[in-house]
Amino acid sequence: MTDAEGGPARAASESLNPAAMRKQYRREGLDASALAAEPMEQFARWFADAARDGLYEPNAMIVSTAGADGTPDSRTVLLKQYDRRGFVFYTNHHSRKGAEIAENPRVALLFPWHPLARQVRVTGTAAKVPREETAAYFRTRPHGSRIGAWASEQSAVVPDRATLDRAYADLAARHPEGEDVPVPPHWGGYRVTPRTVEFWQGRENRLHDRLRYVRLDGDDGWRIERLAP
């Protein structure tokens, strides 16, 4: 990859200057008068646009958490359900994000739909979904993914890849294709109930449109406000 003097790696880094990477956004603007009355309906509209435009995994979202010490952490997960109550994803409750949510349920979500010059930003509170909801979703997963939920102690240190592969092979032998795989007790869903939802639309000259829904006190509707870009 590189020599003692930096060699090819240095040349590559010098030729890729992130400060010089500029795109001029020219998509149609976003006005409050065109927004849905509540954010989940507006999200459904934009999510449909992303899917229709052929974006790769438009349900991929960045989930940011912070534990009791306030240290932030982010990772990409897949949205599996959304409705008026919020956004649902599934994971190992013993993972880092699961442990941090247990300590501090306030989270942020980001849907980065770059080809559309759009992003959706969410802040809210995460809570486990009921076990029956988790079980219903778990049954829809491919057999291999259900085995994987048992085989991986997510976020734990493992000595090597072979250890993980052996754990998967052992479990696959115990639960062959076609047989039921029970839901791991340490695995399940979280629903993020939004407090704010921002819809960001790229515009020319970096004068982007940013419209944010803010939940009113008592969960009695939403206020829409425009933010400076």
Image (cartoon, rainbow, N blue to C red):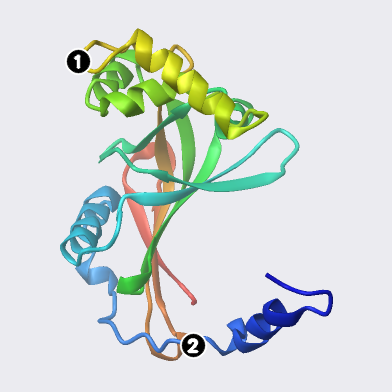
In this view, the residue farthest toward the right is: 4
Left or right: where does residue 121 sit relative to residue 19? left
Left or right: where does residue 157 sit relative to residue 149? right
- As displayed, is residue 19 above or below residue 117? below
Secondary structure type for disc 2 = loop
Secondary structure type for disc 1 = loop
Q: Residue at 41%, 14% (x, y): give it.
A: 171
Query: Earlier along the polypeptide chain: callout 2 or callout 1?
Result: 2
Q: Residue at 36%, 12% (x, y): give it.
A: 173
Q: Nearer the viewer, residue 199 or 8?
A: 8
Q: Residues within 10 Å of mark 1 (few under 14, many from 20)?
A: few
In this view, the residue farthest toward the left is: 52
Q: Which residue is mark 2?
A: 22
Q: Residues within 10 Å of mark 2 (few under 14, many from 20)?
A: few
- As displayed, is residue 169 above or below residue 96? above
Left or right: where does residue 161 sit relative to residue 3? left
Q: Position of residue 26 (x, y in %)?
A: 31, 87
Q: Position of residue 138 (x, y in %)?
A: 29, 22
